[in-house]
Image (cartoon, rainbow, N blue to C red):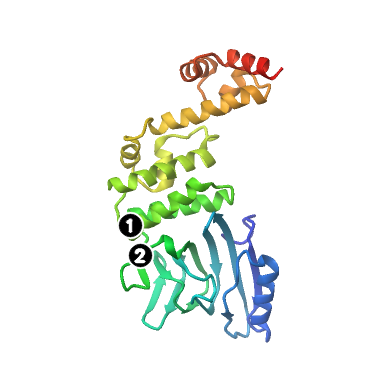
Amino acid sequence: MGEGDGQRFDVDINVAYADENRNHVLLDEWRRQAGEIVPPPPLRLPRHGEGSYAVRIRRTMLHDLVVEDQYSDAVAGSTGGTDGHLGDRVVSHFTLGGQWLFRSARRTAAVGRGSAYIRRNDEPWDFEVSRGTRALMLHIPIEEVRLRSGREAEPVQQDSPAARLLLAHLRACIEIGDVVGITARNATLELFRGVLADHVIDDEPMYAALVRAARQCIDERLLTDPDLHPASIAGLLHVSLRTLHRAFAAEETSVMGYVRERRLALVDRELASTSWTVSELAARWHFSDESHLIRAFRQRFGETPAGRRARSRRAGS
């Protein structure tokens, strides 16, 4: 999320640390840019004679879940409480660089690179952020999450298999944006609960969430990739190829079987909606040649692409 990378941010602010009105300028500009989409917490900028504070946030909605890719320089603030910033949610901070420092009435936690902190936001918290801190944040309604009894927060290491899978999934959601569907929302919840339960990805309870994450990745990012194959999908999801195949073992189709099904469905749709030839559709959806597409299409739909197109045109006339 560096400068000049061409990405669109919901919040993108620079404020001089030496500005006497720096806190008011920051909050006013935040509200002007994001309104209620990304509500600002009460923030306090340190006073320095030179330099400026920068904050950049990209936000994606997964129905009632929120994912944020956030960069911040040195700042302090407060959040939480049932009437406070973000209300009664569970907020997870997956720190990719820099450091957060959290304080509540009962605990203090430093959360640096490679660590994560999952906390109930219905409790009041003070926080400090070091310069150059980057994090992925996940906000979940509190009724969807059960922390351990008596715990207001949980520390998590990002190098566990379950956490790596969740992070890969969150990055995909940020890249895709708000077009993701309810399947992505439900997969996010299952993956998050797997992190809390400290599942390893080879545990069977995680397979259903892994399959959903893989299908989302295939559907929304990779169908147009000519080099799409199980190893590339496993790499994006930070799991082994063996684990990916094991997750699909209980499904009606394999990883590449699912890819072929989705591509054939798109061919079927475009036979009716475009004038592309069968050869062009074969190249567009990465079948080895026209005859390969015809064989696969006949096996799937019981007729050739040409017959399907002719029948579709007769039905529409």
Residue nearest the viewer, comparing 311 with 97: 311
Q: Residues within 10 Å of mark 2 (few under 14, many from 20)?
A: many
Residue 19 percent across, percent down from the top left: 68, 83
The residue indicated by pointer 2 is 156
Q: CA distance from mark 1 to mark 2?
A: 9 Å
* Proximity of marks 1 and 2: CB atoms separated by less than 8 Å: yes
Q: Tell me the quarter of the image containing the C terminus.
A: top right
Give the residue type that dot 2 points to: Val
Residue 147 position by quadrant: bottom left
Rendered location of residue 245, percent (x, y): 33, 37
Amino acid residing under circle 1? Ser
Q: Position of residue 286 (x, y in %)?
A: 53, 27
Is residue 107 toward the left or the right of residue 316 in the image? left
Determine the secondary structure under disc 1. Answer: loop
Position of 151 relative to 194 (above/below): below
- Which SS class for mark 2? strand
How many dots with numbers?
Answer: 2
Q: Residue at x 47, y 20 (%)?
A: 300
* Left/right of residue 241 with respect to residue 227 in the rendered view: left
Q: Quadrant where the N terminus lies?
A: bottom right
**Residue 95 visible in rendering:** no
Question: For the point 48% across and 51% down, which residue is it?
Answer: 185
Against 131, residue 11 (above or below) is above
Q: Quick check: can you spot residue 69?
A: yes
Q: Is residue 134 left or right of residue 111?
A: right
Q: Which mark is residue 261?
A: none
Residue wearing tag 1: 160
The residue that appears at 67% across and 71% down in the rendered structure is 31
